[in-house]
Image (cartoon, grey):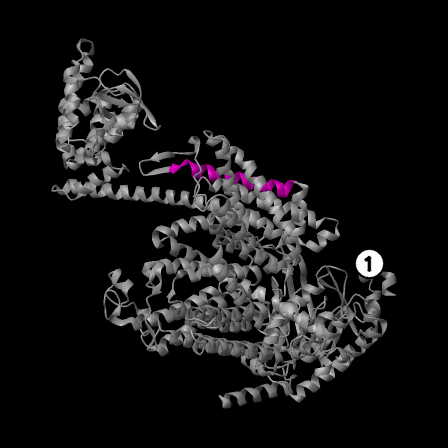
Amino acid sequence: MRRFLSLGFVCCLLLSLSLTAQAQTNVTPPDDKSAYALLEALDVDSYRDKGEAITAVLQSDDERARDWLQALLDGRLQRSDDGRFIVVLDNSGRNWPVADALTGEPLGEMSRRELDRIGINNALRNQLRSAIAVVDLYSPNVERRRTSANRLLGEVDGELLAPINELILEEDDGQVRNRLSQAVAIYRTEQGEMEGVEALTGSLHPRARVALSRAAHGDDPVVADAARNALASVEQNLKINRGVETLYFGLSLGSVLVLAAIGLAITFGVMGVINMAHGELMMLGAYTTWMMQQLLPGQPGLALVLSIPAGFLVAALVGVAIERSVIQFLKGRPLETLLATFGISLILQQLVRTGISPLNRTVITPEWMSGSLVINDALSLTINRMVVLAFALVVFAGLMLIMRRTRLGLEVRAVTQNRAMARSMGIRATRVDIMTFALGSGVAGLAGVALSQLTNVGPNLGQNYIIDSFMVVVFGGVGNLWGTLVAGLSLGVINQVLEPWAGAVLAKIIVLVFIILFIQKRPRGLFPQKGRAAEG
Amino acid sequence: MMTQPPSSQFWLTCPFGERATQVFLGVLFAALLIVTVLHVAVPQGSPLHVNAYTVNLFGKYLSYALLAVAVDLVWGYLGILSLGHGAFFAIGGYAMGMYLMRQIGDRGTYGHPVLPDFMVFLNWDSLPWYWQGFDMAWFAFAMVLLAPGLLALVFGFLAFRSRVTGVYLSIITQALTFALMLAFFRNEMGFGGNNGLTDFRELLGFNLRSNDTRLGLFLATGVALALGYILCRAIVTSKLGRVCVATRDAEARTRFIGYRVERFQLFVFVVSAMLAGLAGALYVPQVGIINPSEFSPLFSIEIVLWVALGGRATLYGAVIGAMLVNYAKTVFTGVMPDAWLFALGAMFVLVTVLLPKGVAGLLQKQRRKKTPTITKEATA
Amino acid sequence: MSLLQSLRTRDRVFEFMAPAASPVDVRHGPILYMEDVTVSFDGFKAINNLNLTIDNGELRCIIGPNGAGKTTMMDIITGKTRPTEGSVWFGSRHNLLNMNEPEIASLGIGRKFQKPTVFEALSVFENLELAMAADKRIFPTLTARMTGEIKDRIDEVLETIGLTTLRFQPAGILSHGQKQWLEIGMLLMQRPRLLLVDEPVAGMTEQEMERTAELLTGLAGKQSVVVVEHDMGFVRSIARKVTVLHQGSVLAEGSMDQVSNDPNVVEVYLGADDEEAA
């Protein structure tokens, strides 16, 4: 309610501002004494008085008002020991570059001990945001106008209506116009006007929904009815959007599962052994990314790109070391291999814990991967997940190419089908084992690089994936990369679909039970290998 | 190839006839006796005195040993590497824990006459249905065996019917215990969530904090181990035991001579799960707490290491392994806790690569060197 | 409990005493009847429209080049592989396609594999003990005791297969030929109505081959025997009726002489291995 009150004040100011805008050249800057008084009024203890002081600043017609308010909002409006008002230009370092709030002239650097911040609370923060939004609507900068129009959704009150309607007519930018009309429609709907309800039909913004549901309980039965209808169509629309979002998260989780499982599928398919240290190879990939970013500070993007080959190499080398030092001595004893590689996974985890840290490390997401793609008010897709999904598909396609088009792939497929026969045809199974293991482990490294962008990088990173990845391999059918892809993506989606309904833990349990029941029907997975070789 | 020495004289279904069993039982009872005497009869100041803490520790080891015997039964003789036996152990432990919780009565922090503290804390107003009956010892003790048995029955039925074996089965059992761990962490499950069940007071009227009760539990665990061992020995020396070994080495062939392999697997799996549950039930009153960490995949796979280190398909090897590894764990975690996981990891690798038959294999080799002429014809 | 025990024991004794009392119904002639059986793996037809009838008490040899579908045929009969089409009957009462391996085995169909598979960790004696016709359910197996009769029966078979001195050795240490014998012994212990014998003489000496031939011909009459063999000399020495398989279906059937004079057979099979057939 306070916000609406304050907006009333803002509105008065608006009129005067619009006048100023028209006659800007004629205005003489107010003398610094009164400006100083305005700022001084901000530096009081009572938040109520502060709120009034903010309104006073807005009504002052001072050109610098927006900057002051923005600085106040960001906590950069401060007062130095000698009583001057200071705008801190950058408060990230140890010493802050500052400028005089009144003259705007830079004053060099000051330490935070010399400065005293003018504090605000949440109510004031909201008041400031709305006030700035209104001021910004007159800004020549389109981006600024868009942001402010967005902010005004659900914040319009009766007194703002007229100037906003006027602005809609003058506005060139469609997006701003659209937003402002919506803001008006929301206000009208809240007032119980039919026009507003009609304009809001199909809008997905949460504030529009609030307004509609308020109108649905209004006094006028016709409007209430229309509002209910509109609300129903909005809900319908939201459901679809939520469905798309779930699918997106499911595919994203699925892509991670595919990345994690596909290396396992290769080594398991060819050698029939479960490498329980597979998850730790992923962890090494993630740590390689972290290490790269430490080596190239300030260039997280380049570091990330470089860690793709680096992560592959590190994991592949460790994988080959595991194969040569342990697995080759356990030929034909898959259960023992499982145990031994589990031991290795413990050692690798503990190495990271003692060598680096038991705590999670922060891997920076480069700018081009952060943020999200806004589809509409209810749906925005995070870019990092999209990149990982694309990466998974690229890795999959690459592996497909290797398997189908290269000599190694041919040999790997031969050994998968029938080891004894392949050997008798002159394929050096040992060399194939090493190469496959390097490939599978390297892909685990790639998975780790991708994962570093989605989850915490810590010593336990890999542990959480080994069971899931094996489920994917079982579900998809051993020795079939397509099976792994389809199984990974579908398990990811199933998980995400179940999660809101059953909760994360129950969803996991349901998926496990599903897989156990599934292998009742199809013990060899979705895409089984057929023929005599598979029977043995 | 998994080879083992030819099994004993097959017509001796009675397990006592075997020398290994006689020696094992002899050593076990001697150890129980010695510890008891050193605890009770030797005065406290003496260097030979075994204090209550150590008795308790040994009691814990003994319950682990029983658990290891259960795992050896399915892994050593049936070839099923269960990475989820911790789940059966934990469920048995929870059944016992529920009984012990009900025994607290109104002496809990909140003083509620029926509800355990954590339920009062969660604002529950009545006991969930699955907590009914656990105030009766006979019911709770039956559940110690039946609950893990039932889980093993359902899980095993599904798994064995569709011929899931080898690494597939291992991973699925691991997933099982992992899923259960997640489930038991939830407060809504009604098993105390993260904290589990604790603050136990008495068992069958005996104060759990008294030294005499601890000694009694230690001895009871020893006797349970002996009985479990005899039961397993009886199974593996019967014709059924030989069917198990046949299944382990050539499953398809066993089917072709007319055995319904999946039923044998299920039977032995369920028996083993019940033994694991019993071990859990004996473990809980001795350590005074049961929480979801017993479900962790790491614990289950550690059990397998005990068996591997001691020597598979010998039963007594499992006991040796459980004792050795847990003693090492106690020592390591006391002296340098960081090194324990390295040591554990290294043990996994070294045992599987260098010592596939475990300590028992070494012992057998020693014995064979000493008496090289014993052949089966001589004893036939 | 003791009553239960005695019932169970009586039941088992009964079964052991009369193992041939398999419920198979052969009053209407054939013991095994395969009609229009087809098996395809990913489109490749390993068995293509196979029709085969084995009469009660018959000794039948099945020959054919590699990949003719001989082993797959045995897999179908014993329940290891399910055909895509067709029907397989044991006697006139039992549809084998509805049964799994142990059910088929306990009906009285025994099989010796191409690659000898014995239980290597168990002794020779124990291998035979497990194979013996008995109540193979769980509790009877758990409580089974070694009786004098069982021992005598095992000793008898040990004598027949010539492994008496090795009876307490683990089967894993046997030579390839000895394993073959042990498998035959296990088959004898089962007392099946129908024996499926896949390459019984591979790895055997000339004398052993003769003994095997003797054994198999001796069994025929009481039991039905199907032998798959590559060794033409051996087939000639035992065969009364020979079936030639080629590309998953029957190419020719008849006596050895009839078959070896069949121009089709000569072309696809004997022609290629003429000197071996001689």
Q: Which residue occupies the extreme front position in the image?
A: B45
Check the picture and name the quadrant holding the N terminus of chain B. bottom right
Judged left or right of residue A255, residue B143 is left
Residue C164 % position (x, y): 76, 80
The boundaries of the magenta stretch are: A381-405
Image point (39%, 55%), residue name: A505
Badge 1 marks a residue whose secondary structure is: helix
Q: Nearer the viewer, residue C160 or B236?
A: B236
Please, what is the dominant secondary structure of the magenta stretch? helix
Q: Nearer the viewer, residue B284 or A375?
A: B284
x%, y% of residue B331?
50, 61
Amino acid type, residue under disc 1 in the picture = Glu
Q: Nearer the viewer, residue C126 or A209?
A: C126
Magenta span includes B45: no
Q: Quadrant of residue B92?
A: bottom left
Instruction: State the image coordinates of residue B183 (x, y, percent, origin top left).
Output: 38, 59
Task: Note whether B10 is above or below C179 in the view shown.
Answer: below
The quarter holding residue C83 reads bottom right
Where residue A369 appears, x then y in whole percent?
43, 33
The residue lying furthest to the top in this view is A26
